[in-house]
Amino acid sequence: MATLQLGILVSGSGTNLQTILDATADGRLDARVRIVISNRPDAAAIGRASRAGIASRVISHKAFDGRRSFELALVHALREAGAEWIVLAGFMRVLTPAFLDAFPMRVINIHPALLPSFPGMDAQGQALASGVRVAGCTVHLVDSGTDTGPIIAQSVVPVLQNDTRDSLAARILQREHQLLFEVLRWISQDRLTVYAATNQQRARVQLDDVNPWFGLDPMP
Ligand code: GRF
């Protein structure tokens, strides 16, 4: 199996990025991070990439006339760096087909909710406000909707009586790190098959010989 060639898009603190950097550095993940790109110059994630000796760039959406030219600049930089799979690790921009068509079914996102519930911004706050008893995170393939693409795997955490938005977000974030690592490992092991949409069924992902309800006890 070929080493995964990753391009990682970030906007913020980059703890999910750090998980990937650590796992590639110590050999738990057969992947190479070719480039980290942030749309925000002040993202702490950029410092994480530099400390790990990984190439990074800031490509600010504000420097472009519109979405399309911003996204084409991202595509250019990712291709130039040799990235084949793209990970949105806390990347806070919606991507359109201008970007997605360049890496068909090879863009994954980590979202801090059990999709299809609570897509979009402040998923953890939405979960808390709704009164759900369990929350969690989802890794999915990205399509042009907001957090609507085919689900790869999910992980559940409890919502506790005295949770605040931040305490719940911290519990979910810890699980995000584990889930993202697991999914990338499955991809690196060729365990993921994507079935395109048909008239009867939307696109879906099949996983071979893994536990896609990660974090729960194995089902009987
Ligand atoms: C994570 O909760 C991610 O799911 C969300 O933004 C947060 C980013 O965290 N989209 P980090 O930048 O990986 O630390």
Image (cartoon, grey):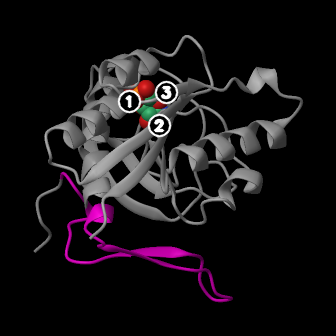
Q: Residue at x 42, y 48 (%)?
A: 6
Magenta stretch: dominant secondary structure: loop
Residue span colored magenta: 186-215
Q: Which residue is mark 2?
A: 35
Q: Is residue 5 visible?
A: yes
Q: How many neighbours does mark 2 have within 10 angstroms: few (below 14), some (14-19), or many (20 or more)?
A: many
For label 3, count other residues whose C-alpha is less than 10 Å away and answer few (under 14), some (14-19) or many (20+).
many
**Amino acid of disc 2:** Ile
Q: Amino acid at mark 1?
A: Ile
Q: Ligand 1 closer than 8 Å to the CB at disc 3?
A: no
Q: Are marks 1 and 3 in contact (CB under 8 Å)?
A: yes
Single out the residue that lies furthest toward the right.
65
Q: Position of residue 191 (x, y in %)?
A: 29, 73
Is 208 one of the magenta-colored residues? Answer: yes
Label 2 SS: strand
Residue drawn at 36 percent across, 33 percent down:
17
**CA separation, marks 1 and 3?**
6 Å
In this rendering, the answer to whether 66 lies above or below 185 is above
Which of pointers 2 and 3 lies earlier in the amino acid sequence? 2
Q: Which disc is residue 54 wearing?
A: 1
Would you say the residues marked 2 and 3 are in contact, meaning their CB atoms lie under 8 Å apart?
yes
Which residue is disc 3 drawn over? 56
Quadrant containing the N terminus in the rendered view: bottom left
Q: Check disc 1: other Cα within 10 Å, few if <14, some if 14-19, many if 20+.
A: some
Asked if disc 2 and disc 1 are in contact, CB closer than 8 Å, the reply is: yes
